[in-house]
């Protein structure tokens, strides 16, 4: 089989991302995702029910604080439904980003003993995260039935924003995973990003509350957050709220830049992972 | 070119000693701003200008002492790490087995781990599925397939893991010392399986300290020392070269301890030597082995005695002795100061294998506690047998040879 020829040459550093090799390991990708899913819920008494309890409780708290307490105005949309859309996207993004960020460090023993395209490890986290995301969608569906709120016609665009969310979380996650190998400081930074990031993302509140009250340059900075524009798009496609503003395109641009650059940066450090991990 | 399966061309691998690339952000930032406080790093060449060709169907044994670069070479060949210089061409589907059970997850069942481990080793799920029954039969853990692996004994885990590895179907197989695990019977099974693989015309690269296994499995050998190839050729010649080298170098087994003034008695140094006091790691079954101890008595301790065991690599207790075996107890006779003690393990007692010496010093009459000095497992050495025809194939627990004497001739024809 001539196609199994491998050449290792220290004097050349290829620019190719070797996607074909990645594809050859697709079964490992599924298996790793299955492992994570299984391990997460193995031996817990309630199993998958936990995945419902957490977002549900978060929504209850959000409702109490933002809707009852702060009297936040979300127009025609019931607040809980409004927050559920933001939460589903944010949970996916932060979950995948966090998991992928720590993933290479967590797979140390494997990385030192066997070869496979290392990118498989953070990539598989994006698949596991989809479970939580589907649960988020179930909650949204349930709330729509409860509030008799019909889905918007923009629903057609939802897959686009889902793909964007996936790319955004992988972009950040892959960057973090590669950086964590070299700088362990990022192990501290990741949980911090997950916790504080939510406040700088229109999850529990509509973005325009903020954008209307801060200077333009600050709004631009706010939309450098890769997930900010995507969440706007999410609400727009599911609930038919206001269309994503021009500012959202900043987010989309950031997402693409992050994702593409993360692949190349990862490729660059991949070769040294086993030596410096 | 058609028959070369691996072509290694001037491979070198450098590590930086004192390198903190996996360090903190602060250091990196500090390094950018100040050039004067450069961390001192030193080059270490784990591999230096290695070149060799492996023909299709060759079974190559790579031998060398610890730190000779064997494992680094395997890591480079299996693409876990990149060489610093040089070029390698590999022609054929390659699988490397530097560890059995890579990626095994304790929470998953045996069945799930077979799939996980198989895909990590480069099989597709369909491939694992088609070989599943064979793998399970080979491992002998059928009954526990749906039990989480964390409930397995370590032996079961190894058997399952090796079973997966044994059913890989690569054209080139790279194996590092994986036979060092499992019980003797299972090891034999593994070795047999690997011989089958070698017999099917696959290319094998095998690293082991077990010369019997290397001899049995390989046809050609490469001898590494300090990251360089010092010999390659027929496996028997290479093993001889390696053994001679081992005998010649006196950097054998020696363990020293830092002085601790709080201890009334302390073992300062232990060495395993031959009759001429040369330290060795590899002894012939034919020679006496001496354990040379240097100890320091600071305060006389009534009832002080030494305890010693010799265990084989499976932790079977082979010898157990203490200083009361020969009276008067030599440790009770000690006077304060430094003394040397020698213990002889007579020839043709220990069989071929790897042995570890454990030592403890104690006293039942000591006021400040029973244990006086506990050095623990201090020495490990190997025994081989090249002086008899049966040699390393002798399976007995002892390497004792029995003399067959002719005592008379009854009938002459």
Image (tube, coloured by chain):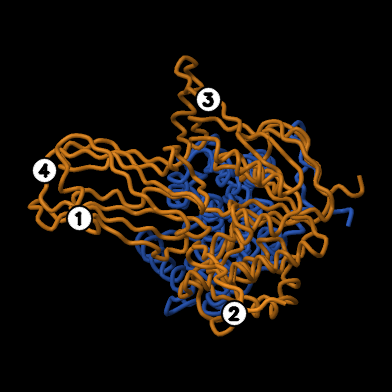
Disc 1 target residue: B327
Q: As displayed, is residue B231 above or below residue A234? A: above
Residue B140 numbered tag: 2
Q: As displayed, is residue A247 above or below residue B42? A: below
Assess disc 2: are there few (<14), some (14-19) or many (≥20) residues with their C-alpha within 10 Å of its C-alpha: some
User: Viewer-nearest of labels 1 and 2?
Assistant: 1
Q: As displayed, is residue A237 above or below residue A51? A: above
Disc 3 target residue: B42
Q: Which quadrant would the N terminus of chain B be assigned to in this image?
A: top right
Disc 4 target residue: B300
Question: Which of the pair B342/B365 is nearer the observer?
Answer: B342
Element type at mark 2:
loop
Q: Looking at the image, tell me whether mark 1 or mark 4 is earlier in sequence order.
A: 4
Assess disc 3: are there few (<14), some (14-19) or many (≥20) residues with their C-alpha within 10 Å of its C-alpha: few
Gap between marks 1 and 3 measured at Cα: 54 Å
Q: Is residue A165 visible?
A: no
- Please report contact status of discs 1 and 2: CB closer than 8 Å, yes or no: no
Q: Which chain is orange?
A: B
> Which chain letter matches label 4?
B
């Amino acid at each position: 089989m001539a196609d199994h020829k491998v050449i290792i040459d220290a004097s050349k550093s290829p620019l190719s991302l070797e996607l074909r090799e990645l594809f050859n390991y697709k079964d490992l990708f599924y298996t790793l995702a299955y492992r994570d899913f299984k391990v997460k819920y193995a031996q817990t008494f309630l199993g998958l029910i936990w995945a419902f309890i957490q977002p549900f409780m978060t929504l209850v708290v959000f409702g109490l604080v933002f809707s009852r307490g702060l009297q936040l105005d979300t127009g025609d949309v019931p607040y809980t439904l409004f927050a559920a859309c933001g939460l589903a996207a944010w949970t996916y993004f932060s979950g995948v980003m966090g998991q992928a960020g720590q993933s290479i460090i967590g797979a140390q023993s494997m990385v030192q003993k066997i070869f496979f395209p290392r990118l498989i490890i953070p990539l598989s986290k994006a698949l596991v995260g989809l479970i939580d995301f589907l649960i988020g969608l179930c909650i949204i569906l349930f709330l729509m039935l409860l509030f008799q709120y019909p889905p918007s016609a923009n629903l057609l665009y939802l897959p686009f924003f889902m793909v964007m969310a996936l790319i955004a979380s992988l972009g950040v996650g892959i960057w973090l995973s590669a950086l964590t190998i070299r700088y362990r400081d990022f192990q501290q930074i990741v949980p911090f990003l997950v916790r504080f990031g939510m406040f700088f993302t229109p999850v529990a509140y509509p973005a325009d509350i903020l954008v209307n009250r801060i200077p333009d340059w600050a709004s631009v900075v706010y939309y450098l957050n890769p997930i900010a524009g995507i969440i706007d798009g999410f609400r727009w496609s599911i609930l038919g709220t206001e269309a994503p503003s021009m500012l959202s395109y900043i987010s989309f641009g950031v997402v693409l830049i992050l994702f593409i650059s993360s692949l190349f940066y990862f490729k660059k450090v991949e070769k040294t992972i086993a030596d410096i991990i | 070119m058609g028959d070369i399966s691996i072509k290694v061309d001037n491979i070198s691998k450098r590590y930086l000693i004192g390198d903190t690339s996996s360090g903190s952000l602060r250091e990196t930032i500090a390094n950018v701003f100040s050039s004067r406080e450069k961390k001192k790093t030193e080059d270490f060449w784990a591999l230096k200008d290695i070149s060799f060709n492996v023909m299709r169907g060759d079974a190559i044994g790579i031998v060398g002492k610890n730190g000779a670069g064997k494992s680094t070479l395997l890591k480079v060949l299996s693409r876990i790490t990149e060489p610093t210089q040089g070029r390698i061409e590999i022609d054929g589907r390659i699988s490397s087995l530097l560890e059995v059970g890579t990626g095994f997850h304790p929470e998953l069942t045996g069945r799930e781990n077979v799939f996980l481990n198989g895909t990590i080793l480069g099989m597709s799920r369909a491939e694992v599925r088609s070989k599943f029954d064979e793998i399970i039969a080979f491992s002998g853990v059928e009954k526990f397939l749906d039990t989480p692996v964390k409930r397995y004994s370590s032996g079961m885990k190894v058997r399952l893991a090796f079973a997966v590895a044994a059913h890989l179907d690569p054209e080139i197989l790279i194996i590092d010392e994986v036979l060092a695990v499992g019980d003797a019977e299972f090891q034999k099974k593994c070795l047999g399986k690997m011989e089958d693989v070698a017999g099917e015309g696959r290319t094998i690269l095998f690293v082991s300290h077990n010369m019997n296994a290397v001899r049995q499995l390989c046809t050609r050998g490469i001898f590494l020392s300090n990251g360089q190839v010092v010999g390659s050729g027929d496996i028997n010649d290479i093993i001889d070269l390696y053994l001679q080298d081992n005998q010649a170098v006196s950097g054998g087994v020696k363990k020293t301890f830092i002085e601790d003034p709080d201890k009334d008695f302390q073992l300062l140094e232990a060495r395993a030597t031959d009759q001429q006091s040369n330290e060795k790691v590899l002894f012939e079954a034919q020679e006496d082995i001496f354990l040379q101890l240097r100890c320091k008595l600071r305060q006389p301790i009534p009832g002080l005695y030494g305890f010693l065991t010799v265990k084989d690599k499976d932790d079977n207790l082979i010898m157990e002795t203490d200083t009361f075996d020969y009276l008067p107890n030599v440790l009770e006779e000690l006077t304060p100061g430094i003394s040397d003690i020698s213990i002889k393990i007579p020839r043709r007692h220990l069989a071929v294998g790897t042995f570890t010496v454990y030592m403890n010093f104690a006293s039942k009459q000591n006021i400040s506690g029973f244990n006086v000095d506990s050095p623990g497992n201090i020495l490990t050495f190997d025994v081989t047998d090249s002086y008899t025809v049966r040699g390393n194939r002798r399976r007995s627990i002892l390497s004792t040879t029995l003399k067959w004497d002719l005592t008379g001739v009854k009938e002459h024809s």
